[in-house]
Amino acid sequence: MSARLAGGMFWFSMVIVTPAWAQEDLNSLLEPIRAKYQLPALAAAVADEGKVIAIGAVGTRVLGQDIPVTLDDRFHLGSDTKAMTAVLAGKLVDEGRLAWSTTIGDVFGESMPGLNPGFAAITLEQLLSHTSGIPTDNEEIAALYFGNAYDDTPTNLRRKIISEWGSKHEPAPGDVGSFHYANLGYTIVGAMVEQVTGKPWENLIQSEIFAPLGLTTAGLGPQATTGLYDAPVGHAVGDDGQIEPRPWGPSADVPTVIGPAGSAHMSVRDFVTWAAWNAGGGKRGPSLVTPETLAMIHAPHVSMEIPDPPPGTPTSGQYGFGWGLVEFEWAPEPLLTHNGSNSMNLATVLIDPELDLAITVVTNFPGKGADSALREVMKVLYEGYSPSGAIP
């Protein structure tokens, strides 16, 4: 038997076991890993029962420049935004304004009479679990994201994308119910939330997620202020291996229209605060959604098998609403996790609701090396701060 004590200490066989790195400052753990994988910056945090017990941030905001990162620096979260969009939808379910069975047609039917019946029949649950039959981003979908990026507000652009795609396509019967990771699906969820509330998704995530949780560094889009290197900026890697910082402007993030699928940024401290709220099952305030609704969001809804996945994506597991349930060789049971990248940054979150433990790891660099670095940090932190990590 083992029990976790405060500050990353463990009780086992009447002996307190304290890993050398198990201290509030994680910099000495992070720096060798950052250097090993040649990352500009690397940050991580651990929360136990809602309290941040370990945190660190090392490296520079811009590769090749001496601009040290800080604990309050904003990192891009990419698709880790999806779980936040799921909570916004869950809040409307709690209020009776949506149901998991609500369809695209139920929300937009009267204003979009040209939608194909199969597309209109897609439910909120299917969109959130990637089982709608909508495909993973392809050239046609990317053209919708980028083609009208400057023509209208994100809210109106989302409606235009739904109308254009939905009038030309409907899911193949064999695809409905199977897992196809679809950013377009979460873009549609954002639009459904906007249609029901009459408010932009960008306002809602601020007022319903960021503000109640006190995520003071949280925002949307590129993490650095235009003209300033006041946050770790993302880096693009060309086919020739050339590395280019992407600090500001349209090239620094995904198009704003797909914000609900992946445009949030915040400090690693705020990120683990969000993760800790999830690890506590929503029972430790604020009450964003009911515990029952959060359990629905966390619950597995579909099995996933992903051959040759991109960096940050597991090969298999189960998927809930913005959360994967994945087996790790170093954990006794599958854990809730998700990764996010806009191809210039990489972030990962891991929660163990049974232990009320949350871990976040972020970097301002993409690719397989960054993925390996984040996985290594996550493994070391979980093994060190969970009871099983104290067992020889």
Image (spheres, grey):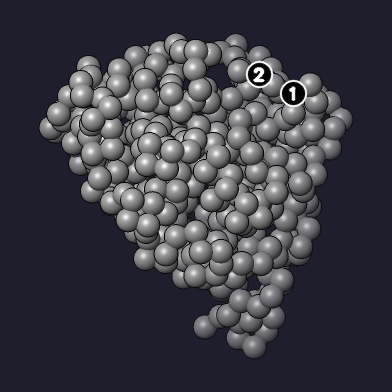
Looking at the rendered structure, the secondary structure element under dot 2 is: loop
Q: Which residue is mark 1?
A: 226
**Residue density around tag 1, few if under 14, some if 14–19, many if 20 or more, within 10 Å:** few
Q: Which residue is mark 2?
A: 249
Q: Is residue 201 above or below residue 280?
A: above
Q: Is residue 85 above or below residue 274?
A: above
Residue shown at 39%/16% (left/top)?
144
- Along the polypeptide, which appears first: circle 2 or circle 1? 1
Say which quarter of the image contains residue 335.
bottom left
User: Residue 118: in sight, yes or no?
Assistant: yes
- Distance, label 2 to label 1, CA atoms, is 7 Å
Quadrant in which the C terminus appears: bottom right
Residue 255, percent from left and from top = 52, 22
Residue 345, percent from left and from top = 61, 32
Residue shown at 60%/86% (left/top)?
13
Residue 6, percent from left and from top = 69, 75
Q: Are marks 2 and 1 in contact (CB under 8 Å)?
A: yes
Amino acid type at image mark 2: Gly
Determine whether, in the image, residue 107 is placed left or right of residue 150: left
